[in-house]
Image: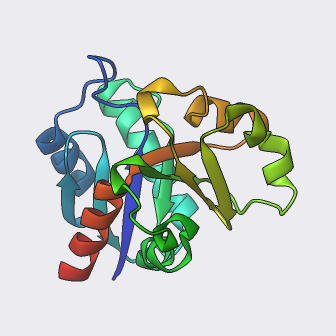
């Protein structure tokens, strides 16, 4: 069995695309996923399956959510190694006295090119900062995620990808849950 972590974007936010986690768990178990575990209401779902392809797992989950709940939900599926790389490669963690409440990770549906940073035009969003690492963008917001235009919608539009952003606390908790499985 392979454990995959599906990051669902845009559910249970401001009353939109509401899906109860218990109903999601039951739905995913009904299509054959095992050891389904959710973390908080914003759509972090661990599943065990024989399926190796993260893209196929994401497609199956997306398809079932649409069929059962009627919501078109973008999904990025990641492995434990992706979360471990967040801790190893996040350049902002090396800063002295870093406020981790301002750190976020955008998980991207595909590996980004080295030129993607230019495409993002992050300089327009100073003093926010970003760094690309494969299929992740490490973000340090100067004020906070709610007060910036450098968000998931901007990233998706500029790079033509699916993206979902998690705060550093959630990334930490998800890695802990992966290690407990």
In front: 4, or 90?
90
Q: Residue furthest front?
A: 96
Q: Furthest residue to the left?
A: 22
Q: Is residue 15 left or right of residue 113?
A: left
Residue at image x 79%, y 52%? Answer: 117
**x, y percentage for residue 11?**
34, 31
Q: Nearer the viewer, residue 138 or 45?
A: 138
* Residue 33 in view (yes/no): no
Residue at 43% of width from left, 71% of height from top? Answer: 83
Rendered position, 83 above or below 41: below
Residue 41, quarter of the rendered image = top left
- Measuring 33% from the left and 83% from the top, which residue is drawn there? 1
35 vs 50, left or right, is left
- Image quarter of the C terminus: bottom left
Residue 24, percent from left and from top: 22, 43
Display colour scheme = rainbow
Residue drawn 26% across the image and 16% down it: 15
Q: Position of residue 34 (x, y in %)?
A: 23, 68
Q: Position of residue 149 (x, y in %)?
A: 60, 26
Which of 85 and 140 lies nearest the eye of the viewer? 140
Asked whether, in this view, residue 108 is left or right of residue 99, the answer is right
Residue 120 seen in the figure = yes
């Amino acid at each position: 069995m392979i454990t995959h972590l599906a990051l669902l974007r845009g559910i249970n936010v401001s009353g939109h695309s509401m899906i109860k986690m218990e109903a999601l768990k039951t739905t995913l178990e009904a299509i054959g996923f095992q050891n389904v575990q959710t973390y908080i209401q914003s759509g972090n779902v661990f599943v065990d399956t024989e399926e190796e392809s993260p893209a196929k797992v994401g497609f199956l989950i997306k398809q079932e959510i649409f069929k059962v709940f009627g919501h078109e939900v973008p999904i990025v599926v990641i492995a434990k190694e992706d979360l471990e790389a967040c801790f190893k490669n996040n350049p902002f963690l090396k800063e002295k006295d870093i406020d981790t409440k301002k750190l976020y990770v955008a998980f991207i549906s595909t590996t980004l090119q080295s030129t993607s940073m230019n495409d993002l035009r992050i300089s327009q969003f100073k003093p926010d900062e970003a760094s690309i690492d494969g299929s992740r963008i490490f973000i340090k917001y100067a004020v906070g995620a709610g007060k910036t235009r450098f968000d998931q919608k901007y990233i998706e539009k500029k790079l033509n990808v699916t993206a979902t952003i998690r705060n550093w606390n959630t990334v930490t908790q998800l890695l802990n849950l992966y290690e407990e499985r």
